[in-house]
């Protein structure tokens, strides 16, 4: 029969804890849960939100096959087939627009290009990435009060910067925009 005294209950408790500790110890102890990175990717549109393996690698999803490469004066970008590039005249900056007629992404390239802000907006998610070997900052709305989806390259050749932004995009448009941002290649 089982223990009937408080001392007997205590001995059983200590015994059970000792068995649990031994199992934990032989399964790797504290080191068994270390992976070198988080287990969950950020949610869309920054990433897929899926769980990934212990090596900490995150693969960038491929650009959809039905997209086309568009060349600007300073960079190329993959865009959906129905989108096109429009150059906008400016004296101090290289300006342009990527559009499908309803959704618009505007860009500025040059020494005087604007930034995406200081990253303190609570309605915006910010992610630092490397795109084509360059430091990039991607922002997307965190909630319905966030409005800007964009990418900013602060350190390009000769002090130039690149800013591409879209305002009030739908979630699907945000995902497409971030996919476009990640396809940028500097010539």
Image (cartoon, grey):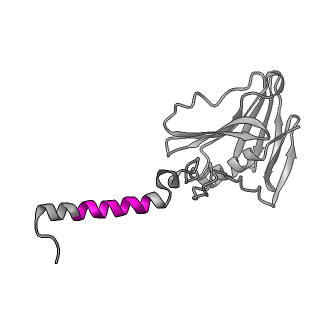
Does 44 appear in magenta?
no
How many numbered marks have been drawn onto this rendered protein structure?
0
Q: Depth check: 54 or 22 in front?
A: 22
Residue 125 position by quadrant: top right
**Residue at image point 73% right, 37% down:** 106
Q: Main secondary structure of the magenta part?
A: helix
Query: Where is residue 61 drawn, in percent x and y?
Result: 72, 56
Quarter of the image that includes the N terminus = bottom left
Image location of residue 44, percent across then percent down: 59, 53
Lateral position of residue 43 relative to residue 151, left or right? left
- Residue located at (89% from left, 37% from top): 187
Q: Nearer the viewer, residue 76 or 166?
A: 76
Q: Position of residue 29 (x, y in %)?
A: 47, 54
Residue sitting farthest toward the bottom: 1
In the picture as drawn, the residue positioned furthest to the left comes out as 5
- Please tell me which residue is depicted at 49% across the width and 61% down the height of the picture: 27
Residue at left 35%, top 64%? 19
Query: Which one is nearer the viewer's eye here, 71 or 61?
Result: 61
165 horizontally vs 79: left or right: left
| Left or right: 67 as drawn, with respect to 153 | right
**The image quarter in which residue 107 lies:** top right
Q: Which contiguous range is marked in magenta?
A: 12-24
Asked if residue 174 is positioned above or below residue 1 in the image, the reply reads above
In the image, residue 37 sits, relative to residue 106, either above or below, namely below
């Amino acid at each position: 029969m089982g223990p009937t005294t408080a001392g007997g209950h205590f001995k059983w408790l200590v015994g059970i804890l000792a068995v649990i500790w031994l199992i934990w110890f032989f399964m790797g102890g504290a080191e068994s849960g270390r992976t070198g990175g988080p287990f969950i990717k950020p949610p869309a549109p920054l990433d897929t939100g899926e769980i990934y393996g212990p090596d900490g690698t995150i693969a960038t999803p491929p650009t959809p096959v039905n997209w086309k490469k568009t060349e600007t004066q300073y960079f190329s970008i993959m865009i959906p087939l129905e989108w096109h590039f429009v150059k906008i005249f400016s004296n101090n900056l290289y300006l342009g627009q990527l559009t499908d007629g309803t959704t618009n992404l505007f860009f500025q390239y040059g020494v005087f290009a604007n930034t995406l802000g200081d990253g303190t907006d609570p309605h915006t998610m910010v992610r630092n990435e490397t795109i084509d070997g360059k430091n990039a900052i991607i922002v997307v709305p965190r909630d319905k009060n966030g409005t800007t989806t964009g990418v900013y390259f602060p350190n390009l050749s000769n002090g130039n910067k690149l800013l591409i932004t879209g305002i009030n995009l739908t979630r699907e448009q945000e995902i497409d925009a971030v996919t476009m941002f990640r396809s940028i290649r500097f010539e």
